[in-house]
Amino acid sequence: MVLVTDASGNTNTGISTVDHPAGSGRIAAFFDLDKTVIAKSSVLAFTRPFFNEGLLSRRAVLESSYAQLLYVLSAADQDRIERMREHIAHMCEGWDVEQIKSIVDETLQEVVTPLVYAEAKDLIADHRARGHDVIIVSASGEEVVTPIAQALGASHSVGSRMRIVDGRYAGELEFYCFGEAKAVALRELSDRYGYDLAQSYAYSDSATDLPMLLAVGNPRVVNPGRALRRVATENHWPILRFTLPVPLKRRIPTSPRALWVAGGIAGAVALIIGISSSLARRSHASLRY
């Protein structure tokens, strides 16, 4: 079941009664996050502060480094990705959910949030000016995706979700917003909010998001790798080049104390999901379409 977060931070299943009739002409613009809206992975900055705060052991840092090595060498197959993802997920077992959400909110800009492409910000503003809903759909954890989406002025967001038991993370994923799951999320959003997917837009840099791109009538690729560029060229999809990252401004003031303590905790949630996403993206990009 996909959980959808709206602009106010409220969460719902995205599967309830349709609010607008299908085919009514309501248009949405769906954006991937990492390497599409932001200039780098939302997870890569977290390992060092996480270790500095004592939340990662040296062994865990080494294992994370190994995962990054696999990413660089494109040597990770799907089974290895899944094993690494499950192993990293266990790192946060028992952490208090509300504590993490609070710290993420306070430190997003300075510690967590990577730079946002100016071109992406302008494009999002253009869609909003045209009356389109903007939705961020990302494999990163919803604890990071939701506040970034709110800062960007998005209408809704969907991210991966950890299973929670008694207010604490249970150490396993409940929903992984990756690959075909993104297309499922688009269809559920369409059912709920009455989007006409044939008129809607989707933006991504990765071939792993082909299900999402193929689900709409106006797919766009951003800084694509070789595999996605080939698909875009064959299908005459527009290819966009984003080059200018700028700081994402936050409406909520941050506290110096929170900056000092928070990097690792926020990073863990994204690290759980982000490393596997990065590995899978790179591995998938080597496939021929």
Image: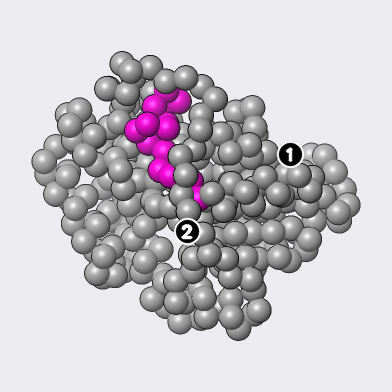
The amino acid on which the numbered mark 1 sits, given as a three-letter code, is Ser
Separation (CA) of disc 1 from disc 2: 39 Å
Tell me the residue at 17%/31% (across/down). 52
In screen coordinates, is 193 left or right of 287?
right
In screen coordinates, is 177 left or right of 6?
left
**Badge 1 is on which residue?**
16
Does residue 80 appear in the picture of this structure? yes
Per the image, label 1 sits on a secondary structure element best described as loop
Tell me which label, 1 or 2, sits earlier in the chain.
Answer: 1
Disc nearest the viewer among 1 and 2: 2
* Picture quadrant where residue 198 is located: bottom right
Image x and y of residue 112, in percent = 37, 36
Q: Which residues are magenta?
A: 104-117
The amino acid on which the numbered mark 2 sits, given as a three-letter code, is Thr
Image x and y of residue 53, in percent = 20, 28
* Picture quadrant where residue 158 is located: top right
**Badge 2 is on which residue?**
243
